[in-house]
Amino acid sequence: MSKVNSAKWWILAGLWLLYASFGLIVASVAPMVGEIVTDLGMSHAAMGSVMGAWQLVYIFAAIPCGVLLDRIGGRQALLLGALLIAASAFGRALANDYWSLLLAVMLFGLGGPIISSGAPKVVAELFSGSQRGLAMGIYMTGPAIGGVVCLTLTNAYFLPLFDMQWRAVMVLWGACAAAAGALWWLVSSITGLAGRTTTPAGARVPQLQIMRELLSAPAVRVVLLMSVGVFLYNHGLNNWLPELLQNGGMTAVQAGYWAALPTLVGILGSLLIPRLATPARRFHILAGLCVAATLAALLLHSADGLSLTAGLILQGIARSSLMTVLILTLVELPGIGEQRVGVASGLFFSAAEVGGVLGPLGLGVVYEVSGSFAPGLTALAGIAVFMLAGSAYLSRLAEQRH
């Protein structure tokens, strides 16, 4: 294996660590909703707004972060992203009311898009062909494993270890993010592969012009609309799943373990499905993932063990790869290219986080009004059907290009 070929896998390992810490902090509130609500005197609707707060900031930050990535390169930008999400976790630990917790969570919306836009940009620069799909699948196991660690160990191990102090657990996750940032800086410094900008200064095209050109393409617009649906579905279920399971009769510890099942399934899916999603079969795979998402939302209505298990497995299959295959579709659309990956990814995540806000907020409000998660799950099934229609349309556009 050549030095360059070996180095790019070390870069991927650094990206994985950043995304794992991203996943830890994204999942950090969900298993401790009860403790936080009680400590700060908040309602479920208020907690829903906190869960969606960072996504709201993310909507406006994602495009500038994409521009920043194209300007200064992945090494510096991704370190900044890691430090910001670490600061968000530390800020949560210091929160003493709704507003201070809200502001701390919102800070994550500044660091998160740097990592989620920077990872596909770095991968697109270093990998090609089926290796690109594999690399994207690998780094996407990072947030999944981070989420598993958080969901399974928070109530079972870390809260008891820290005498049921949720703030101490938040400090631990912040320290993990800061350590991941330090390791990323070390790996990228040694290899030297992630320290460059994509476009020379003299060759830069105005960013607004690039965005107009991207948005003029029908396929880009459809991908952006689908991204809203994917994030609405994923963020809504990811944030409320432990509470949903407890509402069905599980204890907090049981809910933590069961909520980790989709993530564990998703890890396997992330390693297999994106690699298979070559252009020839990408849209068939995308459609299959949308069907899995629809069935998962419907099956999660049930308290029956077998139906619930099937729903959680299908949710894991869908959530593991829907976003990855959709990003892969975007970065390989005609007219994107390596020079525009940062801006294109920024557009993707800016649009997607509209769904990221509506998902947890919507499920929280629906539960507050109805006293049940059933109406929200039905709505999520409808969103998945919408995404299925979008994948069929993308397939037709691809056929027309050929």
Image (tube, rainbow, N blue to C red):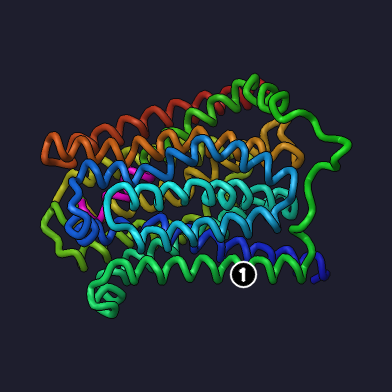
Please state which of residues 267 and 184 is positioned toward the viewer in this rendering. 184
Quadrant where the N terminus sits is: bottom right
Please state which amino acid type lies under the numbered disc 1: Ala
For label 1, the crowd category at 10 Å Cα-Cα, with few meaning under 14, some 14 to 19 and many 20 or more, is: some
Can you tell which quarter of the image residue 17 is in?
bottom right
Pick the front one: 216 or 205: 205
Task: List x then y, in percent, for residue 162.
Answer: 28, 77
In-image side of 277 versus 226 (left or right): right
Residue annotated with mark 1: 182
Is 239 covered by the magenta stretch? Answer: yes
Badge 1 element:
helix
The vertical placement of 201 against 252, above or below, is: above
Does residue 241 appear left or right of residue 396 in this picture? left
Quarter occupied by residue 256: bottom left
The image shows residue 191 at horizontal and vertical percentages of: 77, 68
Q: Residue furthest right?
A: 202
Residue at (79% x, 30% y) in the render: 205
Q: Quadrant of the C terminus?
A: top right
Read off the magenta span: 234-243
Q: Which residue is depicted at the point 76% across and 28% down?
A: 206
402 relative to 378, above or below? above
Farthest residue to the bottom: give it: 161
Classify residue 205 as left or right of residue 284: right
Q: Say which quarter of the image contains residue 246.
A: bottom left
Residue 153 visible in rendering? yes
**Dominant secondary structure of the residues highlighted in magenta in the image:** helix
Visible in this render: residue 280?
Answer: no
Residue shown at 49% from the left, 62% from the top? 86
Where in the figure is residue 193, as x and y percent of width and height? 78, 60
